[in-house]
Amino acid sequence: MFKVIVFFMNLMRFSKKLLCLVFCLFFLQSSAFSGNLINFPWQQNFTFLLPSGSVSYPGKQLTAQPDLVAFKESSMVLETSPETVVIEIGLSNVTSTPTAAYANLKYNKAGVFNFEMDDNSGKAVDVFRVLNGGTASNGVTYPGKFFTDGCGNKINYRGAVALNFLNNYNQDQVVNNAAGKKINQEGLNLLVGNNWTLENHGYAHSAGNTLIDGDIAKNIHENTKVFYSKMAAAGLPYRIRVAVTPTNDEGYQPTAKQLGYIGLTTQTRRDDASLFSGYAALSPDWTQMLYTHRSFNDKWDQTTTNSFKEKIDRLLLLNATTATPQMFRLGTHGPDLPKWAELMDYLQTASKDRVWVPSLQELIEYFEVKRLLVRTSTYDATAKKLIITLNYSKIPEHNRFRDVSLLIKGANVTSVSVKSGSLDKVSFNSSTGLINLYKVKKTFANPALDVLPPKIVSATLTGSNKVRVVFDRSVSLTKTGFSIKSGGVEVPVSEVIGQGTVWDLKVLSTYTSSSVLSLYYRMQRGAAVDASNSTFKVGSYIGKKIVNKIGAVSTSGMQSLELDSFETDSLVASEHSLQAYPNPTTGNVYIIPAALSGQGAITVYNSNGKIVLQQKVQVEKGQPLLLNLDEQASGFYTLRLETSTGAQVSRIVKL
């Protein structure tokens, strides 16, 4: 009986090996290989070696030879961290010690043509059909436009679409309305799924939208969040990293940079920054945001189309006569499709495969990866193999396109094997020494979890020349960068008085109860920062509404006038501060005593110093106490917690 069991166990083992060999034979027969490029639809450890080149994963190895397919174990598997990739490059005709260097541009191209579609353009899908191949809305079927990766593999031209979420004039959503005129979710899925990119054009097309109220950081970040959620729900997580300034508004460049954006397009607005415009030389390492101009056009007649052909000619001439690669950028709400196809035909023919056509994000991320990727090399002269280790741990989490192109000098490349780590695919050119390592990130942190800079909660005119500004947390600031605008006249702030979350801005002008005012803060000129983390700068505010409370009448019929608590309030003198959150609050507020304990009482004072609420409490050090202010009017309040062990004070704002 035992021999029978052993027989069947051996038979099962043989069946598994036979099934595996049949699978491999079927894969080789049915797969369509192009040049030296192989796509991996799984993450198993296989190596595929072809006569024209090789791509490999550790563990198992398949060798393709005439009339023979062999299946064997790989001799070496290197253990590395998930952030590390190790590749082994086989070499021949070694003339000097082989070295590897990054290509100036991906695929070792000589120049860049770059474009984006503006304002949720529904025509982006038609433009995609022209470039990727397919039938557009005009009924014409296009073959597609492409360059090669320098190793014989075709890559279609790519672009970007700039997105708003809200209509500029009301709170209607832009996406999914006016079918055909504005891109819908299906269109977004199509673009992102084919390595196009999305760009942030503002949650609303104007920061003057009532939901935005001049808060540039909010206009940018809310849009980041909403399109992250939309794409995640579609199974295509996406984190926007490039912005397009709405209209030609100010404030976007410094604020987007503060929020971690790597690129921004504008027409002429500079925001005190250096604008990268015209035929741009791609020589900087771009350690800061790339702030760039584009040639914008919606008039697609023959004259305009010919002018763009001339600009392509100039791009090619500059690339041929200068050592530094050049870039030309174009923007449009939507081209005439026949003229667009004509221009793309011209680009493909005239460029002779020398021009890379990526989105702006893909372009900048290539430079970002080159700058931050840690690369080490070891050459084995006996085996004629160059071992390269790539450590991606310093690449930002939001970086999507992690591809890199290497140029091998001193020998011919005969094979490339991924010995450890994960790449999407690899291609190489034996004669030029070009190696392309493809790696596209598919998951990103939810921007809803981002830690954001301090923001302004409210701005109120409390005196003829004083505006009280309340922040969501303690800040440090000076008068620099702040100004008040009324009747078209903008006046700089002359003095600031305050601490923590509440600050008074004074100007050398006089306002009345009928004055209509707005607040401006330009962060690139100012010094407002988080009091506990100076790297968090307050973002730009361009035209935030100031509530005019001069002469306002309270419910008791008495005129309300806020005291200058920073100059007269003795309640907070020499006492420890009390933590209170949320601040501002709409009702409930939690109080956290830092060093008090025992029986005590909370006293609430209004802005006039009058007691409006008292409550007995049992205090335990570090434990929150709940205070309800639902019955109190909107305004500024001082909380005082007192026990036998001491007293603490905090100011809060009731909305």
Image (spheres, helix red, strand yellow):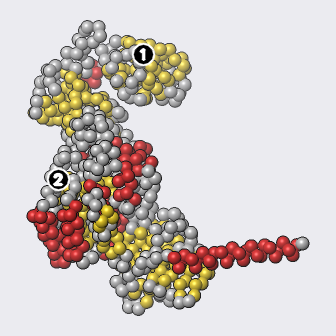
Residue 297 % position (x, y): 16, 57
Residue 24's spot in the image, x, y percent? 58, 77
Please name the amino acid that badge 1 sits on: Thr
Q: Residue 640: x percent and y percent?
A: 41, 19
Report the amino acid beneath label 2: Gln
| Left or right: residue 441 compared with residue 543 | right
Q: Identify the residue at image location x=23%, y=34%.
A: 544
Q: Residues within 10 Å of mark 1 (few under 14, many from 20)?
A: some
The quarter of the picture where residue 519 lies is: top left
Q: Which quarter of the rendering shows the C terminus?
A: top left
Looking at the image, is mark 2 or mark 1 earlier in the sequence? 2
Q: Is residue 456 above or below residue 76?
A: above
Say above or below: 295 vs 214: below
Q: Nearer the viewer, residue 614 or 91?
A: 91
Q: Visible in this render: residue 447? A: no
At x 38% / y 82%, what residue is drawn? Answer: 429
Find numbered disc 1 in the image and state the secondary structure of the residue it sits on. Answer: strand
Q: Report the residue that reaches farthest toward the right.
A: 1
Label 2: which secondary element? loop
Which disc is residue 319 wearing?
none
Q: Please count the marks in the image.
A: 2
CA–CA distance between discs 2 and 1? 55 Å
Q: Is residue 383 left or right of residue 512?
A: right
Image: 43 above or below 93: above
Q: Residue at x 19, y 31 (%)?
A: 518
Q: Which residue is mark 2?
A: 267
Q: Position of residue 568 (x, y in %)?
A: 27, 19
Q: Which residue is mark 1?
A: 603
